Amino acid sequence: MSAHHAGGAFAERFGPWALVAGASDGTGEAFAQEVAARGLDVVLLARRTEVLDELARSIRSDHGVRTAVITADLTDPEIGVVVERGLDGREVGLLVLNAGAVHGASHFLDRSLDDVLQLVDLNCRAPVTLVHLLGDPMRRRGHGGVIIMSSMAMAAGSAFNATYCATKSFEVILAEALWSELQPLGVDVMSVIAGATDTPSMQASVDRWSDRDGVMDPTELVVGALDHLGVGPSFVPGADNRAAAQFLWPGSRVQRSQLLSEATASMYGFDHVQAEGRDYFENPPPV
Ligand SMILES: NC(=O)c1ccc[n+]([C@@H]2O[C@H](COP(=O)([O-])OP(=O)(O)OC[C@H]3O[C@@H](n4cnc5c(N)ncnc54)[C@H](OP(=O)(O)O)[C@@H]3O)[C@@H](O)[C@H]2O)c1
């Protein structure tokens, strides 16, 4: 199992470029700043070019790394082509899939089908497309990392949030499966199961969001997540969130993933090297 990757070791393992999808504010901006502080060049992707350009300028001057901007909508059916073109051959060693937008709650049937399917595109289609595009070169190089931002909402289907919960669950299961396949080949995949976090999106969705108890600071979340990459298939930021997650989602995820992977390998006749890692509730992570 790979251990923590600090300083130069982090850049060697996850460089030269990080692509942060949904980078213009909140946890995405914090990921972009923090990976640059750890020595990675950063590609910033979101829909607002001016905000990205400004962030790119400040990252270059604060951290002395290279930056690039891709203006794109992750729900674009051509997102794979758009990203490949925007990357222009840059070697991505770390993919952060941040955008995931809950943006309010309502009865499933009161949402337009377009609205619902947009969330499926954002949280299912885009991650699958981008991991498929960028995971293969990581596998060939024998190193790299993928972080998928999920949510505590993945733990069960909640009324008023059906599609959000379902797509956030999809992300965790996708990350677990890819962790199991890719860790033996040197690529670390991890979902971040976030609780309430102080981001502009949530400030816009819920009154006085920042004043609520237990709302986490995005930078604290991001530092914990990056320190945890390579430790296990999922990370829950914050001790209170971890306690809540263990209540909502008991049992060993590592063991379940290992057992299911073993069974699938034997059923279909694959050689399988078991991924090894810690569960999110074991051995307190660094943050
Ligand atoms: N905040 C919380 O309390 C909380 C709790 C649990 C989980 N999470 C998870 O954490 C992640 C980040 O959440 P967040 O609160 O920061 O809000 P968010 O709305 O998911 O993310 C905001 C970022 O994503 C970009 N973005 C949104 N839709 C996009 C699209 N269609 N195409 C390209 N970029 C897009 C936004 O930039 P542009 O507007 O410029 O495109 C911005 O940079 C999400 O996956 C969310 O599910 C958050």
Image: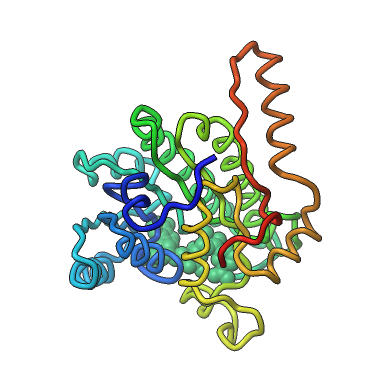
Instruction: Tell me the quarter of the picture where residue 49 sits.
Output: bottom left
Q: Nearer the viewer, residue 41 or 158?
A: 41
Instruction: Tell me the quarter of the picture where residue 161 sits.
Output: bottom right
Q: Is residue 103 visible?
A: no
The percent coordinates of residue 23 (x first, y second) are 37, 62
Q: Nearer the viewer, residue 208 or 66?
A: 66
| Residue in the image at 20% along x and 38% along y | 89
Q: Nearer the viewer, residue 167 or 147?
A: 147
> If the image is split into quadrants, where does the N terminus sit?
top right
The percent coordinates of residue 259 (x first, y second) are 74, 30
The percent coordinates of residue 13 (x first, y second) are 36, 44
Instruction: Tell me the quarter of the picture where residue 193 sits.
Output: bottom right
Q: Nearer the viewer, residue 50 or 154?
A: 154
The percent coordinates of residue 25 (x first, y second) are 39, 70
**Number of marks:** 0
Q: Is residue 37 above or below residue 140?
A: below
Q: Is residue 255 above or below residue 260?
A: below
| Residue in the image at 50% along x and 32% along y | 182
Q: Is residue 69 visible?
A: yes
**Does 35 sit left or right of 70 as displayed?**
right
**Does 283 sit left or right of 99 as displayed?**
right
| Residue in the image at 49% along x and 42% along y | 188
Q: Is residue 178 above or below residue 60?
A: above
| Residue in the image at 31% along x and 65% along y | 37
Furthest toward the top, the residue is: 269
> If the image is split into quadrants, where does the C terminus sit?
bottom right
Question: In the rendered view, how is the structure colored?
Answer: rainbow
**Does 149 sit left or right of 156 as displayed?**
left
